[in-house]
Image: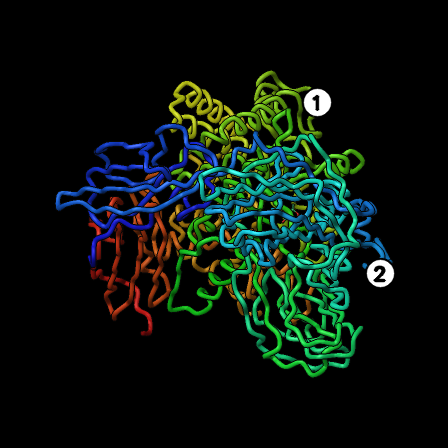
Amino acid sequence: MSEQRCRDLRVEHERRPLAVASPEPRFSWVADHAQTAYRIEVVDRAGITVWDTGRVPDGAGALIPYAGRPLRPLEDYTWRVTSWSAYGELREESHFGTAPDLSRWEAPWIEPAQSPTELERWSLMDWIRGSGPTTDPSERLRPVQLVRQRIALTEAPVRARLMVTARGVYSAWLGGERVGDEALAPGFDSYRHRMSVQTYDVTEHLQGGPTVLAIALADGWWAGRIGLTGSSAQFGDRTAVTWELHLTMPDGRTEIVRAGTGAISAEGPWTYADIFVGERYDARRAQQWTSTTFDDSGWAPVAVREGELSPLVAFSGEPVRRVMELPARSVTRTNDGVVVDFGQVIAGRVRLRIPALAPGCEITIEHTETLDAQGDWFVNISGINKEQTDVYVSDGRAVEWEPEFTFHGFRYARIRGLDALIADDVSAIVISSDLEYTGRFETSDPRLNRLHENVVWSQRGNFLSIPTDCPQRERAGWTGDMQVFVAAATNIARVTPFVTRWLENLRADQLPDGRVPIFSPRSAFDDEAITTASGFGSIVAAAGWSDAIAIVPWTLYERTGDVRILEDNYPAIQGWIAFQTATAAAEVPPALAGAELSAERRERQRLLYNTGEHFGDWLTPSTMEGKPTHEAIGIAPALTSELAAPMFQAHTLTLASRIAAVLGRANESQEYASRADEVRDAFAREYVGADASLPVELQGMYALALGLDMIPDHLRDAAAGRLVDLVHARGDHLDTGFLSMPYLLDALWDAGHRDLARAVLWQDRAPSWLYEVDRGATTIWETWDAVAADGSVREMSLNHYAFGCVDDFLVRRFAGVAPAAAGWRRARIAPDIEAPLDRVSAAVDTPFGEITSTWQRRGEVVDVEVVLPFGVEAELVLPDLTLTLHPGRNEVTAASSVRLTV
Ligand code: RAM
């Protein structure tokens, strides 16, 4: 190995965080040697050591919890790590800051003078019927509010921290300079329960002398249109902002300046701004309103809401940022505007270079993910309040412009009002939570590579403040989608802070009876909507969706070794289990209601959570064929829910048992394990035939039953045989919905049908992943036929990561990289050198550093190379060979029965 270093020092998964929220943050690093012991020292700004672990004999440098003197809020610390091996020591230093103590927050909420946004509430039925507002967006929406507050400073502080949060989304300027580089702050939270406060280092903004804090405040997720129905004002109908500026003066004194009575407000250039509808910017109304010298004499006083209790929390995780800029691929002039293709479906917005035009000239930008078969404009996401249209009104001057308070899901933009537009004038700005994308997967098959890229892009487009189903339609934090995708997500990026934050929201949204909602954040409007709805609209919790509360933390623990994520979520898992258990005991499926049941059968029914309304194996392809979507979507739920629900019940019990064991709760672990056994036993007696048949002959039910261990051992081969038959019956195509998709290929693989798993994967007719690739997909689609073989397009999302769960299979099986113990202390590298490929190369980030696995066919042999970081014990498993790997580069040449063209 090259130069040995102790590197990648992190606190709570982040490098040099400014405001760590946890009072006991965890420390991690990577040491390029066989560490035998470490020492951590933490020193405050005064040079006082607040924690010194002394020399700790331990090989790992992963997530070591702080155990020194209480950390002070809003403080900066330096930390040093010393890492010893048999050959010497490595040392490195880094820094972190702590979040403010929000229990001491005194600033009030500042409410700009505004008319409350008119509540626009639409039911699911309105949505399905497509009925909704017919008025112009500008009549339905209200202006962005601008707020200014003067700050009198006699001298420049040596250190300044600005803390802000808003009901709405905000952008802030201090001393005329933009604060931070975040987009859409404070992000989406379950605002009833938590408002995230951002902390910024603004020392450089303050030179002494009077200055101004300027904040623009749009409706955002708080008051704007969100969710499936696109109803507005789901959390509140007025925007507001609160902030505190903490200054350390040269003499060491602390001064605090708070949001308050000096604040004034006005309307500015944004006539409206809404996440769904888009925004309208009227440059004629623009002024230098962020500058200190601006004449604000005509501005109105704000309402100051003192003493209102607000559930403030320190923001954790990565903020949303503008993470990439994509050039235009082509610009096509049509009879109705210029259509720009960016070559990639994204979440983001268009940036335009606008020439000098006559004042008042309007430029509109519409967005869509696809064109129709003829290449004409086609909006694949329509419906109430989902216009996705931005408008710029010229003041006569040339400018570069980009919307500020919205984002769209699109690949194509249609621009009206700029007929002379050329490619250089336009780009697409990608908006996403700013995660580190660490994974790599590449093969000799360009179609597989594109599939992987499509998954990465669907993750990027949907990891936007919260994990969403799709970035153009409801943009909601659907739990089922995340549950099936999370394993793939961990290979692609460092996701723990982002997912941890979302789980905090999900737990906050859990109902008192233990139900974990089907999406989070959830609003009071959602609570109200279910009371009048029926069918899907009435679902609060659902099998395979609510189970995200167990599956997501467990997967993260397996992939990162983060025990705290188990501790934090365990009570919520117990709550969900309590709900499932109580419901199981109280209800029987409708077909059995009123029937005389034997005592034995009644007993087993009491154990099974198999009632209620669920989404089941959502969007199972064969159940959708030849039917309009609104009719088709109900079929899989009706067929599969009774079976799927107890399978996930058993799975969650098993995960709870494993989690309890990790947390040292041996009795509870035992109890959950035996309840899981009882449920599996009851399921087998109720639903599994003597010939291993299930009452629903769909691939998904067998894939789930095998993957979730619902089939008695002596029937597993027979059940796998049935699954194989069902796959053959569909011409070796998949026929699995959301819930079973992650299990199908592994079920075939584990039962020894590797060829069939590969055949399903390499299918190029729908339903299949490579069909999408062949149709030019650049992201993963919601349904396989979103674009039909003849090119005709449907109104479906083209950016839904759920079926992208296959990416985990690609990495685990073809590159063979998988953890064998939690947090990668052990790994099993079992590359599929019999795959019909010449070459595979993958990299997966672990707490110990990156593992890479590469193999390359050379005639009758295969060269395998694995690079392993220190701290991971690993075995290489090849068809006829098992080897222990050592840190650094490992090279093996293996015989292979497969011969491909090279
Ligand atoms: C759809 C969402 C999501 C899914 C639910 C059940 O509207 O897009 O993907 O989880 O329904």
What residue would you read off at disc 2? Answer: 136
In the rendered image, the vertical position of residue 42 relative to residue 477, given as above or below: above
CB contact under 8 Å: marks 2 and 1: no
Instruction: List x then y, in percent, for residue 303.
Output: 76, 40
Q: Mark 1 highlights which residue?
A: 595
Does the numbered disc 2 mark a residue whose Cβ is under 8 Å from ligand 1? no
Is residue 555 at all visible to an observer of this figure?
no
Q: Residues within 10 Å of mark 1 (few under 14, many from 20)?
A: few
- Which residue occupies 36% across, 59% down? 842
* Residue found 32% across the figure and 55% down from its top: 831
Q: CA distance from mark 2 to mark 1?
A: 56 Å
Q: Earlier in the sequence, mark 2 or mark 1?
A: 2
Q: Nearer the viewer, residue 468 or 604?
A: 468
865 or 733, which is in the foreground?
Answer: 865
Amino acid type indicated by mark 1: Ala
**Quarter of the C terminus within the rendering:** bottom left
